Structure formats: C-alpha cells, structure tokens
Image (cartoon, rainbow, N blue to C red):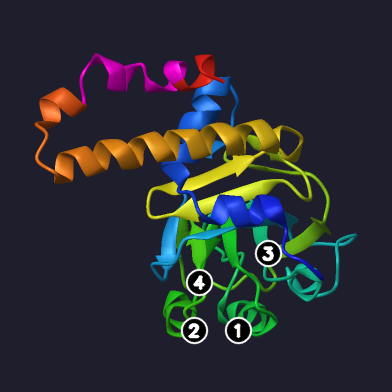
Amino acid sequence: MSSADASVVRLQALDTCAVSDALDRLGLSGTVVGIHRVSTERRIAGRVVPVKLGPAGEGVASRHLCSAAIEAATSEDVIVVEHHSREDAAGWGGLLSTAASVRGVAGTIVDGSVRDADDSRDLNYPVFARAVVPLTARGRVSEHAWNEPIVVGGVDLKPGDLVIADGSGVVFIDANRSAEVLELAESIAAREAKLTAAVRKGTPVSRVMDGSYESMLKQHRSSE
C-alpha cells in the first residue's frame, strides 16, 4: 500500500472498549467474546484478510493453510481465521507466525485453536485465539477458502472490514459503517480521557461516574 489507510490509522489510536461502546450505541454487532491474546502485549488494528478452515479432505486447497493470505497481506492487514471444525488441532503455528512477521503483517486472530505460542511470543508477533494446543493441523484441518466472507464469533466478516484487538478482546467493524463508528468511538475516547484526567487530579470518582457517565453514549450521539 503506497500510502497509509486513514481508517486504519484512526483505529490504531483507539482501543477495543471505545470501539465496542460505539457499536453498542449504534446497535451494531462486532464485539467478540472468548478470543484472547496468546502472544505479546501489542494492540493490533487493520483490515481483515479472511481465511476459512475446515476438515481435511478432497476438494480443498493443497497449499499450506493461511500461506496465500500471508503473502497477500501488508502491515495494515490482520489475518482473521475461521477455524470451527475441531478444537484439538491448531489452525495457526510458529512457521506461519515467522512468515507473517517477516512480511510485516499486523497480527493474526483465530476463531479456534493455535499452537507454538512460545514461538509467536519470541517473535513478538501478535496472535489472538480461543485456545492453545500442541496438535498439528496436518491431516486434520485444511484451508477451504481465503479472501472470501467468513464468520468469527458470530460476526459476519468480509475482506476489508476493520478489526482491533487488545488485552480486552477483539472487535470488528463493518467497512460500510466504519466512518460513523470511528467518529463516535473517537468522541467516546476523548470523553473517557477527560474523565480519567479528572480522577487523576483528585475529583472523587463518585462525582466522575455519576448519572452523566451512564448516559455518556447517548449524550455523544445526540450532540452530533
């Protein structure tokens, strides 16, 4: 990508909680429960490069799973993997983290299990997943599609949607709604920063987190 993706740059300045709050206020889905950090403390944000895994067998890709996505991704992309066919076999591993790290990919999110967590940690490559297991995908899991729509945590995703992931979890943003979600999330984050500053200056938390805090999302939306 020759120039920075403005939406990705804006998303990188936020956190999952502000984005989740914005989705809540707009009545949109996107916040995923149960996918957590496996390696590094880094927050990641970028465009979704989707991969769909499924049972091994005839009629599926012969290439190693996720390899095409890695070779197509950039530093502003996050590889997101639908891996629902079995919990005991990994849908991502150390060699893939090495290749993605060399490529400069922002990170990987797997709706399922991964392995080689220590390798990803040593690389400082961000991986998020539901579980970590040692069992290989070979002969058990194959890539069924990439750069096509997938479902992660009950959220429908397509190539180019936005995602942010940090210590609180994973949140997706439909690309078609990204402008309004980012604008509201930025407003929420700015208000949260003011409240935090007030607490640090000694304002009693009971005054900071009064009724106006509970209605903050509504106030932000009505003030637009």
For residue 192, what is the image quadrant? Answer: top left
The image's mark for residue 76 is 3
- The answer to whether one can see residue 188 in this image is yes
Which stretch is magenta? 209-219
Q: What residue is pinned by disc 4?
A: 115
Cα–Cα gap, marks 2 and 3: 18 Å
In this rendering, the answer to whether 222 lies above or below 149 is: above
> What's the residue type where badge 4 is placed?
Arg
Q: Secondary structure at mark 2?
A: helix
- The answer to whether one can see residue 111 in this image is no
Q: Residue at x 38, y 22 (%)?
A: 216
> What's the residue type where badge 2 is placed?
Leu
| Residue 87: in magenta span | no
The quadrant of the picture occupied by the C terminus is: top right
Mark 1 or 4: in front is: 1
Mark 3 and mark 1 lie on one chain; the one further toward the N terminus is 3
Q: Residue at x 57, y 75 (%)?
A: 93
The quadrant of the picture occupied by the N terminus is: bottom right
Question: Where does the image place residue 190, in percent across and percent down from the top left?
Answer: 41, 39
In this rendering, the answer to whether 117 lies above or below 98 is: above
Q: What residue is pinned by disc 2?
A: 123
For residue 65, what is the image quadrant? Answer: bottom right
Mark 2 and mark 3 lie on one chain; the one further toward the N terminus is 3
Q: Secondary structure at mark 4?
A: loop
| Residue 211: in magenta span | yes
